Amino acid sequence: MDRVWRWGAVSLILLLAAGVPLGRPAPAGAAAETLLIGHSTWVGYGPLFLARDKRFFDESGVNVELRTFEDPKSRFFALVSGKLDGIATTLDTASLYWSTEHPFRSVLGLDDSKGGDGIVAVDTIKSIKDLRGKRVAYNKGSVSHFFLSVLLRQNGLTEKDIQSIQMQQDDAGAAFVAHKVDAAVTWEPWLSRAKKTPGGRILVDSSSTPGLIVDILLFRSDVIKNHPDAVKAAVQGWFKAVDYWKHNPDESDLLMAKAVGGWLKDVKTFRETLDGVRFYDEAINRQYFGLGGQIYVTAQNAIDIWKSFGMIRGSVAAADLVDPEFIK
């Protein structure tokens, strides 16, 4: 899941002004159109690889090439330069980068966090309200920041009420285990490690906020306009992969762990991480993208929060980020 972000729309606009091309012509004589999708190393993107390797994308009528870009700056540069057609990322992150100069839209929900993200704290902190005045480590401008902000606001607090300490998610978890901070916003395996730390506990995790931390698949608006059949085929390929995983979990986990690779290449680690994630099938997507669906609520929530921090300066609404046509 994409969790580190502060490269804003201004940088992308400058790239466009410099003449970076937006479109990528389809290969001449190709039997099926090709979509290039960028992603980070994350368990929630496993079905993308399953759809590729089991040829579900091919069966649906599209060739999908997956490109790993761990650095979000590189990933978004590749998107606006036409080296990528789409990106797998979190919905809240997408709201940070949208603009009229380089629009894109979410077409598919991939997965959500159902316990894989959370806040760990010393055991004297019993509630979110108890974070007031405490040293809290989190990665500013990331999905962890978004998660924390939502919880603080639900409890009548803001970031001004806590002592914010900037750290990447893994570093935040490690700092908590080392007793250097009172609380940290992090993910697995640090949630489990914190729970085993003397005096430590999981204050809250994402299982209590379903639909808040969601990975989506987005495409540039010109790709959606000019290649709708390919986009539709990619969506259908994902649905086939998730359905296959449901009926063949052991085989699928092995295939996905090997294909995703990196820190998830061991199938045991892959499965442990997968326990905190829920894949979005077609039924969930229909509900998620439906009229007044959760995707609009979460997107607007993210827009409002990032604007309050001055991280979104232009005009953007939830509807700008969503294209429900491919779920119908």
Image: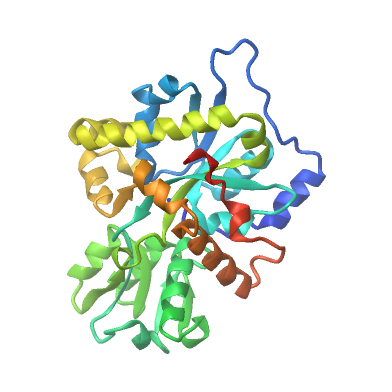
Q: Is residue 9 visible?
A: yes
Task: Give the quarter of the image for residue 239.
Answer: top left
Q: Is 317 or 124 nearer to us in this picture? A: 317
In the image, taking residue 188 as reference, residue 8 lies left or right, namely right
Task: Give the quarter of the image for residue 46.
Answer: top left
Q: Is 250 or 78 nearer to us in this picture? A: 250
In the image, taking residue 170 as reference, residue 68 lies left or right, namely right
Picture residue at 71% right of the left edge, 50% below the top: 12
Q: Residue 192: x percent and y percent?
A: 22, 63
Up-down relation of residue 216 to residue 31 (above or below): below
Q: Is 100 or 228 nearer to us in this picture? A: 228
Q: Residue 166: x percent and y percent?
A: 49, 71
Q: Residue 108: x percent and y percent?
A: 47, 44
Up-down relation of residue 280 to residue 234 (above or below): below
Q: Residue 323: x percent and y percent?
A: 57, 46
Picture residue at 45% right of the left edge, 86% below the top: 156
